[in-house]
Amino acid sequence: MKKTLAIVLMLALCFSAFAQGSKEAAPAAEAALKVGMVTDSGTIDDRSFNQGTYEGIKKAADELGLECTYLRPIGTTTADYVTAITDLYDQGYRFIGCPGYLFQEAVTETQAMFPDLMLVIIDSEPFEPSDNTVAIYFREEQSGFLAGVATALQLKDASVGFVGGIEIPAVQKFNWGFQQGITYANENYGTTIEMDPSNFVYSGSFADLALGQQLANTMYSKGVDAIFAAAGGTGVGVINEAKNRRLAGEDVWAIGVDVDQYTVGDMGNGESCILTSAMKNVVEAAYQQTIAAANGTFKGQTITLGAAEHAVGIPADNPNLDDAVEAEVAKVEALVADGTIVVQDTADGLIK
């Protein structure tokens, strides 16, 4: 009996130890999501598209206490972008924002390579849809249109130009919408704004500040009064030239892009050379997708955002626009949002 009791006690102790060991070996809680971004051909501080996208991701990360970072690729080829995305993935990042048309092939490749990676691409979409990729488009033509109307109503009688970055759809649509906005104002409000085809150019770069300044210098010297700069860092060069000329007493302006660039045109005297900006709310779009990734509602899809979604337009506050101009543009925006005014997203009949 004593032997039997001893054996029973030993077995009970063994089972107890096993149970305790199993409890201690239970899997750890799932690691917090790490979120990141890969820049396109511009820089993270371009005060435009890259910066706006990252600010949206970072805003969500800060609110939720998530680790957040970005990488700038060594170049702008698909291989460079794939390498950068892979580097972030290998470091444990499972949500990566990819701002720009140039990411199309890289996102197509990496969404298949890493099924557990949540990807967001802006201004393009992968060749094949995927459950782990959200593609976001904006109706830039509507934003450019409203900036064009605002510019025409404020200047009334002037000459305008356009400096784009790489000639890709999003930049083209800004240009085409701006031209339509100028034309609309000329036809409906009696403004007389001139658009010389030689003053509508694409620089071929989003990161050449000196080139942007040079192109703006040429246009302003020819008598252009306002330049719409849709060129990322190259566009900042346009803004710098406008800033210098206004400080020298010339009455010239720049029109910003993507985000409210009023502060980019700050001349250090409490004034700015930015008349208004053709915005698309990349900050909010990136923020919302990061939140979705964190709370488990991220879903692969293609989204198009415009005036109806309050995702494009000019800033709510434009210090260099008259109140009456802002009020009139708000009326036009409502007509664009409800479809009464249709802004075309092609170059039919426009300066290409």
Image (tube, rainbow, N blue to C red):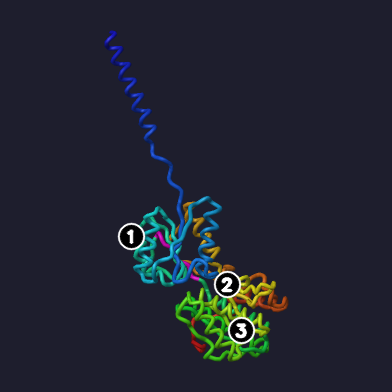
Nearer to the camera, 335 or 123: 123
Residue type, mark 2 in image: Met
Mark 1 or mark 2: whose residue is earlier in sequence: 1
**Marks 1/2: CA–CA distance:** 34 Å
Task: Give above or below for 205 relative to 127.
Answer: below
Q: Secondary structure at mark 2?
A: strand
Residue at the location (64% across, 80% down)?
A: 150
Place of residue 260 in the rendered image (x, y in percent of width and height, measured from the top left): 60, 70
- Residue 205 magenta: no
Residue at the location (52% across, 74% down)?
A: 139
Q: What segment is highlighted magenta in the picture? A: 131-137
Residue type, mark 3 in image: Ala
Could you say which disc has been placed on residue 226 in the image?
3
Question: Dots 3 and 1: beta carbons under 8 Å?
Answer: no
Prevailing secondary structure of the magenta residues: strand
Would you name the residue on which mark 1 appears? 113
Nearer to the camera, 342 or 175: 175
Task: Give above or below for 23 relative to 92.
Answer: above
Q: Nearer the viewer, mark 2 or mark 3?
A: 3
**Marks 3/1: CA–CA distance:** 46 Å
Q: Secondary structure at mark 3?
A: strand
Mark 3 or mark 1: whose residue is earlier in sequence: 1
